[in-house]
Amino acid sequence: MQGLEMVLSMIDLTTLEGMDTEGKVKQLCYKAQHLHDSIDGLPTVAAICVYPNFVGLAKRCLAGSGINVASVATAFPSGNSSLEIKLADVSMAVSEGADEIDMVISRGRFHRGEYNFVFDEIAAVKAACGEARLKTILETGELGSLDKVRLASDIAIAAGADFIKTSTGKIQPAATMPVTLVMLEAIRDHFQKTGLMVGMKPAGGISKSKLALHYLIMVKETLGDAWLDPKWFRFGASSLANDVLMQIAKQRTGAYQAANYFAID
Amino acid sequence: MTHQNSNWDLSPAPESTGHISLKEHYGVFIDGEFRTPDHGNRFQSINPATGEVLAEITESSSQDVDRAVAAARAAYEGEWSKMGGRERGKYLYRLARMLQEKSREFAVIESLDGGKPIRESRDVDVPLAAAHLFYYAGWADKLSYAFPNRNPQPIGVAGQIIPWNFPLLMAAWKIAPALATGNTVVLKPAETTSLTALKLAELIQEAGFPPGVVNVVTGHGDVGAAIVKHDDVDKVAFTGSTEVGKLIQKSIAGTNKRCTLELGGKAANIVFDDAAIDQAVEGIVNGIYFNQGHVCCAGSRLFVQESIHDQLIEKLKHRMSTLIVGDPMDKNTDVGAINSREQLATIEQYIEVGKQEGAEFYQAECQLPEAGFWCRPTLFTDVAQSNRIAQEEIFGPVLAVQTFRTVAEVIKKANNTPYGLSAGVWTDKGSKIFNMTAQMKAGVVWANTYNLFDPTSPFGGFKESGFGREGGLHGLSAYLEI
């Protein structure tokens, strides 16, 4: 139960579709605050994650809820644009009130071996974030090997990322346990060297409670209890919440309820 | 919004023991029946994690050994050596399947009797034992294909003496190839861990093997000596210490007994600076702390390239701090109980030697249970080849770490030992792996893994680690006149 509630509190409830509308974002914001009202004492999710043009709306909908608004930026999901446009994208989201920025790295440049470029870009975005915390999406499904995942993790951490994140959710495979472990090890090694914590966010492909709990155990065993906190660990997911709610309801009542009893915003 | 966690430590998850069946005392298994000899000599088999007595075991006399060998001879001369390979194979397949069906009971008894974590007995010992039986069952009717243009024939009665570190697995390693090739067997398990061999005898009985094909006599070293010296034993197979291996060779000198020995080791586990370090750390831990280090092929000498030494040792210590040492029956346990009081004394003596020699000593912090025999995972750094802890087999969770600079240097040092059972190499570079494996004087060389076993792969030693191979095609030839 404790684990399930923790999973809920770590979810970045996400909608990142071309067809996103005000209506959709409003519904998501409502869901974020009212996960399942028939169960008392549930935590809220950690954040909702939207495109920059919906940040202002989300901010208004979530006012006073304590739920953060995260915005993807930097020409999400491909990252193929100029630095100026990417920084403008970030600035727009931040000025609308985004608490967190989820940027994508330039995978093309990374594959060309232009690691300095990748580093400088992350550092520039970090500077543009101001107070907002920066999550750096490596898009591990496009990196090709665990060695590259580790290298990209090290670059992102060194460039000042507050979080490293596996995926946009637009590319398969998204988050997997091996990829996440490699990134957690990069965080652990950085922490052991510098004493500075970096957060981790696996995103995409985690839709069941059991798998989410496996991830938490991996976090605990690799990084320790300090990371078992929404400040340092998040799940990027849209359908995970309902499965967790279903399990919590089952724990409370002793019986599984049909999926229809859980709202699908 | 922040959901505060309180305690995420693992709760105890003990495997239940209510489902096993153990007798209060066991006789010897001769000619298809359990028999209680008239002399009535017995000793106790205890649980090394608690000191509790599990069962009483027969201390066999030389007459018992005579009877066992006679039964094996009669079975050999009778139907077993004449039976078609396909029929012999069927018996082995049946035994393998029955072992799988009772795998949970065997795993629990193995952990109770030997002290190894249930995770290992459940996931390694028992499945691998069944896999060996299956594998050699498949060869039984294909021996003429294994040795083309030959007429492979069984040798006769095999006397097999097995150690306490992998009791059931070693029984399977010994019995499977012997039976597949048409030999009969007198098996002696180690005195501290007889139970799974006796349970296997029950299965053999239940499987309907012809009487006398497998006989199990229990007891201490002199029972083994009686088997080795017995005039009617044609083949001796022994797994154990190099010291006893030498005694066996002396005692069979001048006879026509065939012999295979799988003895001690002091394996070099070598980590280059280009290795995947976190993966290597897992391999180092698996290499030396698997089964409390009671492994003849344990990676007990770690060689680390000097440029990554500090980083690797730091990671290794961190990893050691997460190892769970304790109740072998708990499914979370990584390191269980030391097999016996005597072995614990040996290990502690070596740890003392290491300290006196001036090596830097480190042990993972962990709570140890009060009863039973325990040793924390131990690490010695600043070790040289001249240190005793780098020369002698400790057979416990004690790792001696040395540094090296060049490939040539580490090959020399790795081979600078009377042993030659196994070795490990960790590098990202394939060419380095092939260069290393070609020059390593060791029967098994693992690359970027450790302690990985498969019945199709031959296992055995160079130099004083023994001779003959078990597993694979090579394992057949040890039991055949070719």
Image: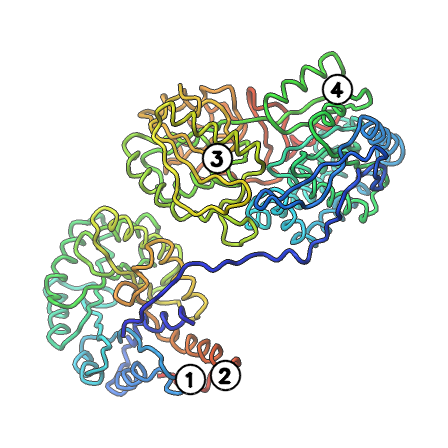
Separation of marks 1 and 4 at Cα, in angstroms: 75 Å
Separation of marks 4 and 3 at Cα, in angstroms: 33 Å
Name the N-terminal-most of marks 1 and 2. Answer: 2
Q: Nearer the viewer, residue B240 or B279?
A: B240
Separation of marks 2 and 3 at Cα, in angstroms: 51 Å
Name the N-terminal-most of marks 4 and 3. Answer: 4
Amino acid residing under circle 1: Phe
Separation of marks 4 and 2 at Cα, in angstroms: 71 Å
Q: Is A99 on the left-hand or right-hand side of B381?
A: left
Pointer 4 and pointer 2 on the same chain: no
Q: Nearer the viewer, residue B464 or A20?
A: B464
B126 vs A64: above or below: above
Residue named by callout 4: B257
Q: Are marks 1 and 2 in contact (CB under 8 Å)?
A: yes
Residue visible at 50% across and 29% down in the picture? B394
Q: Residues within 10 Å of mark 1 (few under 14, many from 20)?
A: some
Amino acid residing under circle 2: Gln
In the rendered image, residue B337, in percent from the top left (x then y), is placed at 54, 42
Residue named by callout 1: A262
Q: Chain of mark 1?
A: A
Q: On the rendered image, what quadrant is the C terminus of chain B found in? A: top right
Q: On the rendered image, what quadrant is the N terminus of chain B found in? A: bottom left
B221 vs A233: above or below: above
SS for tag 2?
Answer: loop
Amino acid residing under circle 3: Trp
Q: Chain of mark 3?
A: B
